[in-house]
Image: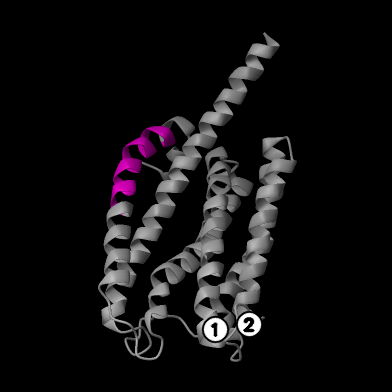
Amino acid sequence: MSIWEYANPKKFMQTSGIVLPWVSALAAICLIIGLTWGFFFTPDAVNFGATVKIIYLHVPSAMMAINAWVMMLIASLIWLIRRHHVSALAAKAAAPVGLTMTLIALLTGAIWGEPMWGTWWAWDPRLTSFLILTLFYLGYLALWQAVDNPDTAADLTSVLCIVGSVFALLSRYAVNFWNQGLHQGASLSMDAKDHVSNIYYIPLLISIAGFILLFLSLVLLRTRTEIRSRRLAALLLRERIA
């Protein structure tokens, strides 16, 4: 069985209809366990107090904001190369979810930054690139709405997605590119010495898993909605012609 079989809308609808309830249930379980454990059953940090618990929202949402754009980039490239409509619709479906994750990350980052840095916002390299990524999300969604022809809209938004990937990359690795800046390094690392203490690490991993599964479930749901909307538009067009 080839992965390209799922480019067939009928095949995608059948498979996603089976997978979606399971992914949604796992997302709910992980989010409930991770966030409850993190916010209510971990101690305040010595240097940061209760503010440290914002990582259970900030870190997963920031990761998914960047990874959502990466997923959109892959789907857009598939559309440009192979012209599979499901991939274009999946990229379109992921954009509002990615934008929401980006806004959550910016808001929680501001909540963290005010007591830690003494300001709600700083023109730090990572923060600035993240803000620009947010504008690309808004531009991507606006471009889909502005162009009537779906295939033309998919082409233009795919090109925009490729350009915006530069800022997705900067949002992820800005701390490595520039040594200066207020934003600290990554909270998660393969090196045990670099990541947060295990008392925060385990519920953080569960929260991240919950955000990943939530993203997948929302993208599947929205892609199914886009396919149904496309079918309805085609039926209405046939009726007008008839």
Q: Amino acid at mark 1?
A: His
Residue 76 circle label: none
> In the rendering, at what x and y percent does residue 239 appear?
64, 12
Q: Residues within 10 Å of mark 1 (few under 14, many from 20)?
A: some
Q: Quadrant of the C terminus?
A: top right
Q: Secondary structure at mark 2?
A: loop
Q: What residue is rendered at 64% in x and 81% in y?
A: 122
In the picture of the structure, the residue carrying the numbered disc 1 is 183
In the picture of the structure, the residue carrying the numbered disc 2 is 124
Horizontal side of residue 159 vs 225, given as left or right: right
Residue 14 counted in the magenta span: yes
Tell me whether circle 2 and circle 1 mark residues in contact (CB < 8 Å): yes
Report the magenta residues as a range.
Answer: 12-26
Horizontal side of residue 139 vs 114, given as left or right: right
Residue 77 versus residue 59 in the image, above or below: above
Q: What residue is rendered at 32% in x and 65% in y?
A: 35
